[in-house]
Image (tube, rainbow, N blue to C red):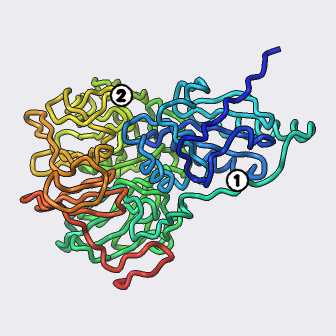
Amino acid sequence: MTPRVRAPELPQNQPWLNTDRPLSIKELKGRVVILDFWTYCCINCLHVLPDLKYLEQKYKDSLTVIGVHSAKFVNEREVDNIRQAILRYDIEHPVLVDSNFNVWEEYAVRAWPTLMLIDPEGYVIGYVSGEGNRDALDQLIEKLIGQHKDKGTINFREISLKLEKQRQPLLTPLAFPGKVLATNTASNEDWLFIADSGHHRIVVTTTTGEVLHLIGTGKPGLADGSFTEAQFFAPQGMAFDIETQILYVADTENHALRQVDFKTQKVKTIAGTGEQSRQIARHSGVGLETLLNSPWDLEKVGNSLFIAMAGPHQIWEMELETGKVRTYAGTGQEACINDAIASCAFAQPSGITTDGQELFVADSEVSTIRAVGLGDKAQVRTVVGSGELFGFGDIDSEGFDVRLQHCLGVEYAQGLLWVADTYNHKIKQIDLNTSSCKTVLGDGTPGYQDGEGMRSRLYEPSGLSALNSHLYIADTNNHAIRRVDLATMKITGLELSGLCAPDVCVPASL
């Protein structure tokens, strides 16, 4: 008979979030406990969160989930940054900050995400790594509850928690905007499309901040219809077709692509079913019949829509004429492998742009900028960065010697690449002729500060878009859009006149 292993006690002297006090295994005796070992950069960890929410709600009187945040990147060790991630992803269970990996090592964890299951008597039952384990966990939890109910060792009661969102409600006009797109329109006006990811909507403004349209109810969901009826779920990247006046949206947590038609003022789904794909092998299919996996950014080239598909670590293509989608580049392996598009590999691509000859990709988990050729015989190469999963930092240099930290955004403009070096809280510029990279905005300290160049401050900027003489930044954790004069490199905040959080007020201009 295999001896049972008692769960190591949780530290009481480390920071805890989403609770007004540290929790202990001893205190939780009588309940089933899941420890979720995660880090907030990791797409697989984010995919586990809906499963945990489902289980928490189903077994709220007998199950406690505790997130154990064991950071991959240096930036993720900061308590305030973890707090922002909790708010961004609407996490409603306690989170223990395990920056020194003490709990990780005590539980012999080896990968993100890992879910450790503890029975009501405080013994480790087992663990699962990776995503897609909800049904197996559901069955095991139900079985455990039944066994311990018969033994009289379960204690049915709800635990009261003080959540971060109760302390800091998301009442700002924008909430964690992920991407921004600046473009000219058919009527020769300059517009901004803002993915108001935390409010689950698209905000359309002029480049001076006048609000023109709100698209989406502000509640998470997947619904087509008019601008006021449609629903999104944490939308991210966008692409605009000036001729047809159609905006394409990567509806990330719906695992779908959406089309916003400004002639009819209607939203409709054009790819994805709302269910997450688990298939990473290269494949293709009809858009509305093919499951997608966390589309994060879009770039339109001719009549094709290229997709930074973060979930399976691939670049995808949608043929807009036929409505078909296919894997364009990447095997599905999480790595940085330069090769032909059928045999290369990416690591959570999260930003995409083009110069018309190549696609440029912000490959976030390897903190590297990649170039992807266009055409069936195209090749993939590294522009800057080490290409290693733990090869990150903050070093301005050339080629492989450059170090970024979880870059999420990239934009081609004025013959240069502009990079949202997200976890370094900076904007960097790459000269494609020399592969040299330099910081042009931000001093590396998270915060909000206007000013010129490196005298300014940003907080996890995630999206970039250039138009005419200005660069627009989705300054995600500042809940703001910032505007940069490219002649002077002076950054200012863009005031969005009359915009409010959903359910707070209605913009006066509408």
* Residue type highlighted by circle 1: Gln
Name the one closer to the observer, 269 or 447. 447
Tell me which residue sits at (35%, 39%) in the image: 349
Image spot of residue 50 (x, y percent): 59, 48
* Residue type highlighted by circle 2: Phe
Q: Height in image: 334 above or below 503?
A: above
Residue under numbered circle 1: 57
Res 66 seen here: yes
Name the one closer to the observer, 296 or 305. 296
Image spot of residue 146 (x, y percent): 87, 40
Q: Height in image: 275 above or below 269?
A: above
Tell me which residue sits at (48%, 73%) in the image: 502
**Is residue 132 found left or right of 477 in the rendered image?**
right
Q: Height in image: 161 above or below 504?
A: above
Mark 2 or 1, nearer chain start: 1
Residue under numbered circle 2: 390
